[in-house]
Image (cartoon, helix red, strand yellow):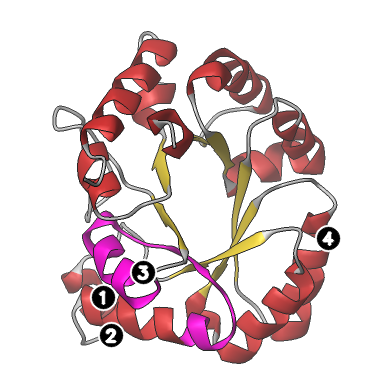
Amino acid sequence: MNPREYLFVALDQMEPKAALALASRVAPEVGGFKVGMDLFNQGGPAVVEQVVALGRPVFLDLKLHDIPQTVARGVRAVRGLGVRYLNVHASGGEAMLRAAQDAAGDEMQLLAVTLLTSIDRETAQSIGWHESPQEIVARLARIAQRAGVNGYVTSGEEAAQLRRLAPGATIAVPGVRRAADAAADQRRIVTPAQARRAGADLIIVGRAIAQAADPLEAARAFVTEIGEGAVR
């Protein structure tokens, strides 16, 4: 697979007009786009359909987490938008995940969110999770696996662990930064080469491309680094 197919640009923290302009500009050099909750709340289904129309796979990042029936209805509503990926929180439990997977059918790939990349060990403990991030991720991944969900969103630090647990799963890794980029609000971050080497299928990059002086050149730089992490 061409290294650029791994790169998904996060369309977050911008208005719909700016997001669509950015997506149109970088589409030839990237594998797909992640439409975040903020953009979806501003532009609704229409902005998702406009991004889908650019011809690249779209990951709709809504992180659904509710009672099983409500999540299933939400998944069914998303199916008609043409997105390739949709995420749900693994911490919603097996019944919720199973209902979501049943509703997704064969039209979408569900991705179970394990532990947010903004949560480190200290933050996890303050919530009441006393395991290490790696143990939390493994436990939640197994719950998703039992529910029939064959995809995960996880930090690059745990991607290799999940690849061993589920060799055929789709693994999305946010919080990816080049060495020179600021970490911002992320805690468990990796470089593009590290993410690819760990087994990531979707390498998600936001501000480092969106806020670059030349987003197209920034996207190309990420693709180059992803290529350097090719598994040999």
Magenta span of residues? 143-166
SS class of the residue under badge 4?
helix
Question: Can the viewer see residue 118?
Answer: yes
Give the amino acid type for the residue marked by disc 4 in the picture.
Ala
Q: Depth check: 18 or 140 in front?
A: 140
In primary-sequence order, the first of circles 3 and 2 is: 3
Q: Amino acid at mark 3?
A: Leu
Label 4 belongs to which residue? 77
Q: Residues within 10 Å of mark 4 (few under 14, many from 20)?
A: few
Measure the alpha-carbon separation of dots 1 and 4: 32 Å
Q: Is label 3 in contact with label 1 (beta carbons under 8 Å)? A: yes
Badge nearest the viewer, 1 or 4: 4
- The answer to which of 90 and 29 lies nearer the viewer is 29
Dots 2, 1 in contact, CB < 8 A: yes
Q: Does any portion of residue 119 appear in the rendered image?
A: no
Instruction: Pinpoint residue 178: horizontal percent, then vertical percent.
Output: 21, 32
C-alpha gap between disc 2 and disc 1: 5 Å
Label 1, on which residue?
Answer: 124
Residue hosting label 2: 129
Residue drawn where x is 41% and y is 42% of the image: 204
Disc 3/disc 2 C-alpha distance (Å) = 11 Å
Q: Secondary structure at mark 2?
A: loop
The correct choice, above or below, for 209 with respect to 127 in the image is above
How far apart, in angstroms, are the residues tagged by discs 3 and 4? 25 Å
Residue assigned mark 3: 115
Taking the image as shown, residue 40 lies to the left or right of residue 177, namely right
Residue 162 part of the magenta segment: yes
Image marks 2 and 4: residues in contact by CB distance under 8 Å: no
How far apart are the two marked residues, 3 and 1, measured between alpha carbons? 9 Å
Q: What residue type is disc 2 on?
A: Trp
